Amino acid sequence: MVEMEKIVSLCKRRGFIFQSSEIYGGTGSCWDYGPLGVELKSNVKHAWWRDCVQLRSDMVGLDSSILMHPRVWQASGHLDHFTDPMVDCRACKRRFRADKLEEEEWVHYCDATKGNKFVVKGGEPCKHCGGKRSLCPVCGKGQLTDPRQFNLMFKTFMGPVEDEAAVTYLRPETAQGIFVNFDNVLQAMRLKLPFGVAQIGKAFRNEITPGNFTFRTREFEQMEIEFFCLPGTDEEWHQKWIDERFSWYPRLGMRRENLRLREHEKDELAHYAKRTADIEYLFPMGWSELEGIANRSDFDLKRHSQFSGKSLEYFDEETKQKVMPYVIEPSAGADRATLAFLVDSYFEEEVRGEKRVVLRFHSELAPIKTAVLPLLKKNSKIVETAKRLCGALSRRWYAVYDDTASIGRLYRRQDEVGTPFCVTVDVQTVGDEKAAADEKVTIRDRNSMGQVRVSMAALEPVMEKLMAGNWADVAREAGRVTD
Ligand code: GAP
């Protein structure tokens, strides 16, 4: 497994992800997506939207606002329950999540065994004095305060007056925008249960301990589905969505062995959940949540009915009765998924005695789909042909032209950002005084480093086959050229 530092460094060096406001020293836990990062993340979101909305007849989309009526957060339970226990260091003023500190081992100077310093295992008190960790794990000097509940929502003010009446919150999940629009969507689209509403958008949480690069941040993007179904069918739909979402990541190239499902214990279920299963990924820091799939029962629609005074029941034509729909919620993080795809595709190999770093992205996710490279940048015919081809390919795929290094170096650069195919234009393509042009270009495959020569006229249909994952067929038909 690659270390996170390598991913962070590659992301900065090659324009995937930068520290936010870096020239001012950076902001804690906020990140900016650079030119290649924005392509990658947008490809992840596009694949999700296509598979969860466009290819399903039982799904529609929504884009609701980030700022909502403050009552939404009372109804949803976020004002009362969306909290983490937190302790502060009285000396250095650092803040920690009490439950996370509890899990870690700590150094103890025990009064019961004078002068004795030893390490106590995470989750256990000292076996001599029964004491618990009381000193700051970072500065080692300050006393820790008792745990206090800390609400993770960002508070702000709506309008010009900053008083209590104007307080509102940045949404901590996109889900509530879907619940409050349930009836609008139902009526406008004349839907029948079961159906789902999908939304991709920003969410904000004032996390006490953000970290691990883009894994836990204070501003992030979610890809959420609220799937409404009849009570009694919820358990079956829940299982269907767990299976569907678990198979989505490998369909986009993620290695199956790096994914697992974890069922929530009863005592860790969110206040609204009847059952939750997490899809976990083996990140560099260990197995961690990638996506949660919860059965939210009828909690949200019931609460919004109560708090808004508007009925959110559904009239079931078959039984001629009103029912409160149940909700299955597959909730994924766009940033977490992007990070997982990055980590999963990272490989270091040795090629002819040299290190090759390669991101083996699925071609659908790769930020750049193809790079068009001139073999000789001083030959104007080669350069013109390469630029023309790049322009033509760009209409369908994100293509780049590069002539700033030797061909070997250009290939390695493209490998490092995961470009699945490079197209090279050489003297044979355009011809010279000794030989007529053969009108063919070389296509090089990132994964195998194999090469084929195909006619320029056929480049677009060939690329289409390659993007669909048919390198072996294309190589067989064209007859392989050596690396
Ligand atoms: N509506 C349900 C909900 O928000 P969640 O498990 O708190 O559930 C869903 O969040 C997903 O959102 C997570 O699986 C994760 O991918 C992403 N996510 C949550 N908090 C995050 C954070 N602080 N930074 C980045 N992604 C986060």
Image (tube, helix red, strand yellow):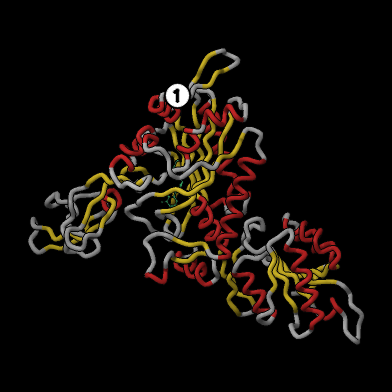
Quadrant in the picture for residue 242: top right
Regarding residue 405, the answer to whether it shows in the image is yes
- Disc 1 marks a residue whose amino acid type is Lys
- Considering the image in quadrants, where does the C terminus appear? bottom right
Label 1 sits on a secondary structure element that is: loop
Relative horizontal placement of residue 440, taking residue 260 as reference (left or right): right
- The residue most toward the front is 160
The residue that appears at 79% across and 82% down in the rendered structure is: 380
**Number of residues whose C-alpha sits closer than 10 Å to that of mark 1, classed few (under 14), some (14–19) or many (20 or more):** few
- In the rendered image, the vertical position of residue 316 relative to residue 388, given as above or below: above
Quadrant in the picture for residue 276: top left
The residue that appears at 61% across and 45% down in the rendered structure is: 49
Relative horizontal placement of residue 74, taking residue 55 as reference (left or right): left
- The residue most toward the top is 320
Relative horizontal placement of residue 39, taking residue 165 as reference (left or right): right
Q: Which residue is mark 1?
A: 310
